[in-house]
Amino acid sequence: MLRRIFAFLISLIMIAGMASCEIMPSHYNGKSENNGTAQRDIFAMDTYMTLTAYGDRTEEAIDRAEEKIRELDTKFSAGNPDGEIGKLNVRKQAVLSDESKYVIEYARKIWDMTDGAFNPLIYPIMKEWGFDTKEYHVPEEGRLEELVGHMDMGKLVTDKVTGEISFIDKAMEIDMGGIAKGYTSDSIMEIYREYGLTGGIVSLGGNVQAFGKKPDGDAWRVGIQHPDGEGQLGIINVEDKAVITSGGYERYFEEGGTRYHHIIDPATGYPAHAGLASVTIVSGSGILADGLSTAVYVMGYDKAVKLWREHSGEFDMILYTDDGKQYITEGIEDIYEPADNDNVYVIRAWGTVHSNSP
Ligand code: AMP
Ligand code: MG
């Protein structure tokens, strides 16, 4: 019975969409504030979010954070013409706020870092599959080939004098879906800091970011969801870090017995299948963790390891492969508790070892 209730709860989370990580100590009681604690559930950016804060001005901080989330939801939504990104997509050129410019330039940075595995010009392809409206369908022959030809980041230009952003190729449209939540959780951390909170943690559809420590002085315990839907891959103990997961299991549809998910390989326009079932990135930067979780899922194990070796000071990762192995980078070896110690390997600066090997 308990197992059935658990399975039901998990399926609810799945329906809610994209719950990849959960915060472990769940003495959770809805919207509340007492003894310097406040917690609130919000639905925005097409996902369920939970904000938790500790300190003296928690309710004010959470009000401000909610306001910020709603502002960014409109601002970054690719299909909302009231927002800046939506306007840019329609008009093909626009003068944007510093915040939107920052996020676009950050997307370019991740595109560059990942040799194009991350490409924010994916929006026409997302639409072609129906991921914008949830009216899913497999595109017609030749259509994706045509669309991948309109994803040249060199044709997204910023005027150095006016700051205006324009698409040289008018078929281009931009989608911040791969990094918007990470930027949003970074912004909430900033708000928590401004309000002088002692600690806090947010989960934006399973993407978690922690501020400071728990009230008892310990690190936050963040569970990484198992892509199969039940249980967890493990728990990571973090302070002041984002823990962001991407996986094909988060959003998908089925047609003709085949599953099609929402992380697209920009080289083909088809859902990426590089041998990974889920990718978790751990970093002090939410926007970096978010962008890289999407990109590494597309890149696969070998390219991911190379990328990490070049940037090991900036992030760590947990790769869960289609054949059930966990690969973790050495920076999180001491703070990660895998649910099952078999099949766990540590990626080091030089080589990879089984975590139980002497
Ligand atoms: P995430 O859940 O962070 O992995 O982001 C997935 C979302 O990012 C999708 O719903 C799309 O909006 C967008 N996206 C999909 N594939 C890519 C890609 N290769 N590069 C950049 N954004 C992508
Ligand atoms: Mg992402």
Image: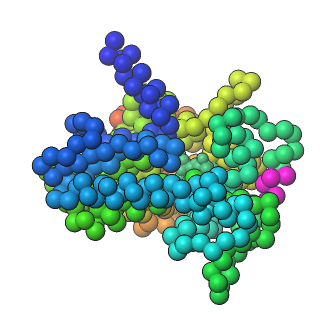
When the figure is inspected, residue 66 is found, relative to residue 40, above or below; the finding is below
Q: Quadrant of residue 170?
A: bottom right
- The residue at 27%/41% (across/down) is 31
Is residue 192 part of the magenta span, yes or no?
no
- Please state if 14 lies on the left or on the right of 340 as rendered: right
Q: Is residue 78 visible?
A: no
- Please state if 357 lies on the left or on the right of 196 as rendered: right
For the N terminus, which image quadrant? Answer: top left
Residue range (magenta) = 146-151
- Please state if 282 lies on the left or on the right of 75 as rendered: left
x and y, in percent, of residue 157 in the image: 70, 75
Q: Quadrant of residue 253?
A: top right
- Please state if 293 lies on the left or on the right of 213 as rendered: right
Residue furthest toward the bottom?
Answer: 161
Q: Is residue 29 visible?
A: yes
- The residue at 40%/63% (across/down) is 187
x and y, in percent, of residue 52 in the image: 28, 49
x and y, in percent, of residue 243 in the image: 40, 51
- The residue at 59%/67% (across/down) is 104
Q: How is the image coloured?
A: rainbow
Is residue 149 part of the magenta span, yes or no?
yes
